[in-house]
Amino acid sequence: MEFQGITSGFTEGNVEALAVAAYKGEKASEFKDLDLVASGQIAAAMKAGEFKGDAGEFLLIRLTPKGKLKASKLLLVGAGDRSDQRESAISVASGAATRYLRKCNVKSFAFDARSNSDAVTVAQNAVQGAITSQFELDKYKTKDKNDKAVNKVVVYVAGAKSADLNKGIERGRIIGDSMNFTRDLANEPPNILHPTEMAKRAQVMAKETGLKCEILDEAKMKRLGMGSLLSVSLGSEQPAKLIVLRYTPTKSTAKKGDLLAFVGKGITFDTGGISLKPGDGMDAMKYDMSGGATVLGTMRAIALLKPSIPVLGIVAAVENMPDGRATRPSDIVTAMNGKTIEILNTDAEGRLILADAVAYAEKQGANRIVDMATLTGAVIIALGEHNTGIMGNDQGLIDEIISCGKEAGEGFWQLPVGGEYSKQIRSDIADIKNIGPRGKAGTIMGAVFIQEFVDKAKWAHLDIAGTAWADGVKPHQAKGPTGVAIRSLIKLVERSQ
Ligand code: BES
Ligand code: ZN
Ligand code: ZN
């Protein structure tokens, strides 16, 4: 996709359409200048109550190209309440415009977000929204593929500096492409994206972006004592891989000893193992590597945005299968930190692989760890699709992520952890067990389990089981993998500089 920034002459670009965000309750008079090229149609439609500026609303107006006006369509995109505007309103509006106009066979349009945000933010979000809106699930279709595409967007911010626009465009492209990189991984079928393939894709991405990448194989993990992680892959023909990515800034502004790590659950398919899941809906478990894919996409963006602090990215890529060699409920394993675990349900496997992965992150020097995982079905029951569950041992880190999410338009909702909850995973015959009592705080049980493997680091856990996959299409987004948390985590890194 091609992007261009302009600071004046919105209606004069060489584009097929104009798209303009309109906020709830705005009067026709606010579009007076624009309405000159629309021959009063905006005012007429607003007067007739045909368009109110609600989020998800559209008004398409035909224009007559004349003189400097080349566009033949004007699209008003409802952007909702201006007072609760977050930057994500810009990306949602630009994404909705892109998808709408794409359907009308439009290949190029100019976009005016009419936002109060600074020019870098506007351009960044406009570009990211346009890029992520065009992601489709049709990679493996040989016919009926979506063959329409918008390939040029002109971003207009009145009176901005072009340098700011260009910076925002570049940032938006990096973030949008990185989100789509994550979404493409999450959408891959598990026969194609097994742990070895996930590691390969990480290596290729690392090479392209200048990250250091190391892949730990099962022999290496065994030497490190990762008995918890390895217990999950015993039933699989596919060997587990621990993907380790390192971003090192040329000039670091980090305090000595500070290292932020992102750790992701990369279960490329979760059958449940011997505690086999019901067949109905099991196919959805290809997305059980979304936490890992989020780490890869975030690290891709970090490598290209080049913040001034080092970041470590770790993905535990494992397949959970039933087999004669698979872990049985009641097996006891020893994790890298020496703790013994009674495995009572092999379907609670995400926490088992994250146990060793977070311990490894801390061993590598991380003093802030954020793990992300499609960890529990319970978080979907609690929070649905609209909030990621967040838990952790450090309120400062949790608050910071929630606040980054507010800016990015991504919801995080905190659940408690602590003493009484931790008691619920004490085992009669080992140090801990991998499940708590049935039906009691399932999401928290996952978190307090992982907490057992964090030593001194500040740690937050994101349960993205409900937010990593959208069950329906939205005006700005295809159904399927969402790339959730990437924008918030980039903010976390950039705020830490
Ligand atoms: N990958 C699942 C969590 C999940 C379930 C995500 C449904 C999305 C939709 C995880 O490995 C799992 O199976 N968790 C169990 C834990 C239970 C056995 C304690 C669950 O949530 O049922
Ligand atoms: Zn499971
Ligand atoms: Zn799982």
Image (cartoon, grey):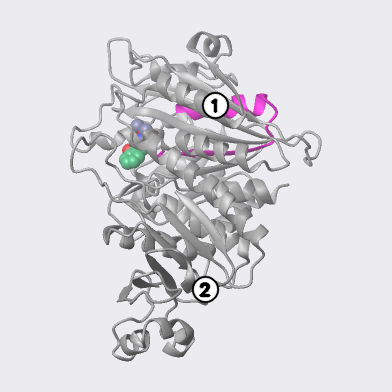
| Ligand 3 falls in quadrant | top left
Is 259 displayed left or right of 243 in the figure?
A: right
Count all numbered tags in the image, as a single digit.
Answer: 2
Q: Percent position (x, y) of residue 258?
A: 74, 37
Is 413 displayed left or right of 75 in the figure?
A: right
Circle 2: residue type: Arg
Residue pictured at 56% horizontal, 32% vertical: 452
Q: Secondary structure at mark 2?
A: loop
Residue pictured at 32% horizontal, 60% vertical: 106
Q: Percent position (x, y) of residue 476?
A: 37, 58
Asked if the residue at label 2 sits under 8 Å from ligand 1, the reply is no
**Frontmost residue, 392 versus 473:** 473
Circle 1 sits on which residue? 357
**Frontmost residue, 496 versus 1:** 1
Is 101 displayed left or right of 201 in the figure?
A: left
| Depicted 432 relative to depicted 484: above or below | above
Assess whether residue 139 is covered by the magenta stretch. Answer: no
Circle 2 sits on which residue? 114
| Depicted 90 relative to depicted 236: above or below | below
Magenta-highlighted residues: 352-375
- One can see residue 428 in this view: no
Assess whether residue 356 is covered by the magenta stretch. Answer: yes
Residue count near mark 2 (Cα–Cα under 10 Å), binned few <14, some 14–19, many ≥20: some
Q: Quadrant of residue 209?
A: top right
Residue pictured at 39% horizontal, 28% vertical: 267
Residue count near mark 1 (Cα–Cα under 10 Å), binned few <14, some 14–19, many ≥20: many
Is 495 displayed left or right of 150 in the figure?
A: right
Q: Percent position (x, y) of residue 108?
A: 39, 59
Residue pictured at 40% horizontal, 41% vertical: 183
Q: Quadrant of residue 326?
A: top left
Q: Percent position (x, y) of residue 54?
A: 37, 76
